Amino acid sequence: MPSTRDIIESVLERPSVFKSKEKLFPEYVPSYLPHREEQLKSLAALFRPVLVEPGSISQRVLLVGGVGTGKTVTARRFGIDFKALARRKGIRLEYVHINCHRDRTLYLVMQEMARQLRIPVPPRGLSAQEMFNIILRQLEERDEYVIVALDEFDYFIEVAGSDAVYFLIRTYDEYPEATKRLNFIFIARDIYALGRLDSATESYLIRNVIRFEPYTSAELYDILQMRASEAFYEGTIDSDVIKYIADIVGVDHGGSGNARLALEILLLAGEEADKEGAPRVTIEHVRRAHTSANPNIAIVYDNLIHLPLHELLVFLAAIRVLKRKNVPYVRIGEVEQEYQQICEEYNEKPRRHTQVYEYVMDLKRLGVIDARVSGKGYRGKSTLIGISAGPLELLEKKVVELIESKRGERSGSI
């Protein structure tokens, strides 16, 4: 019997596909952000007065976009680089990033701002406005400027309310001659969240809006390729595996366009490879990772129970062809041939091509399979079929059980 130490050592000594796993973590800020150049240019243009005429204005910018569209990482990257540029010009500038999912009130925001700026404030006994005044005095004494990013700003609006937002964005209205040392980046998922504010505050916030659209599969491929080169050892992950993840998540292929999800799938796929001691990350590892990362996969399994017999047979055919060829997508013609063989195996009369096509479209509609028209790399036009849920072995077992159950029910009712 191996000892506990032996078990731990056997895992630690196993080779890994990762050289730097943390490069796939959400908090990692890469030096280059593919496909967010325009947003960075917009931020630079809007905050230019902070470097050209420091203290002349207090800038407020709103970043808007869904989960995983690059808002947070763009703000952080901009903050890091803008601070370095300011310091080169002899301007003392700090970047503060506050997550309002955690710090949802004005008091907590002020407390966190003071902490990051290393401004000592009593832990209790002061109001949010008193803390704010201490921060402003300290910035004046230090001759310092700050860009404050309030991430997940939707939560702050919901909890702190319109008055707190008004307090932040109209700080200098009563002191027009004061040096403007505070600037803000507000990061929200949805511009409609501003509807909870009074009209004056809302109109003030939407003056400078930078939008972040969901990523396409081609954009995600570039992001994943860059991160994979940093995170994995050379030769442990192929471009077709990266492309498969990008296709699953890309908004143009029916996915969410969420780069955070795509990176999580890539990370989990690498961990799946390490778990079984595989030297390379494969398509099957991605399927397992996608199942772990996507809470909607349970819906796929639920939908299988209600599928009619021949849709299950077509689905089984797709599973077997994908397993055999070990590729992300196969042509509908290959699936149809396999379906006919499976029908012989179960002594079922196969349906015609048009009906099989309808089954495929129904399976796509239910989210059980991916189906799309072939593009570059394929001769002629054909419907391509893929399955992102996995592992395929477990899916195959489940589908076979359901087929046998449905056939048993049918024979029992005759």
Image: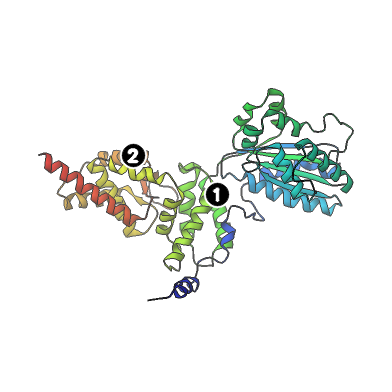
Mark 1 surroundings within 10 Å by alpha-carbon count, few (fewer than 14), some (14 through 19), many (20 or more): some
The one nearer the camera, 266 or 321, is 266
Instruction: Tell me whether the residue at label 2 lies in contact with that at label 1, contact meaning CB atoms closer than 8 angstroms.
Output: no
Q: Residue furthest front?
A: 125
Residue at 15 percent of width and 41 percent of height: 410
Mark 2 surroundings within 10 Å by alpha-carbon count, few (fewer than 14), some (14 through 19), many (20 or more): some
Above or below residue 307? Residue 222 is: below
Residue at 83 percent of width and 42 percent of height: 134
- Where disc 2 sits, the SS reads helix
**Residue 357 location (% of width, % of height):** 29, 41
**Residue 161 location (% of width, % of height):** 66, 30
Q: Residue 204, can we see it?
A: yes
Residue at 56 percent of width and 45 percent of height: 68
* Lateral position of residue 83 relative to residue 339, left or right: right
Q: Residue 368, can we see it?
A: no
For label 1, the residue is 260
Q: Earlier in the sequence, mark 2 or mark 1?
A: 1
* Lateral position of residue 131 relative to residue 279, left or right: right
Residue at 52 percent of width and 44 percent of height: 257
- Quadrant where the C terminus sits is top left
- Where disc 1 sits, the SS reads helix
**Residue 59 location (% of width, % of height):** 77, 37
The one nearer the camera, 231 or 126, is 126
**Please, what is the three-letter code of the amino acid marked with disc 1?**
Arg
For label 2, the residue is 361
Above or below residue 365? Residue 116 is: below
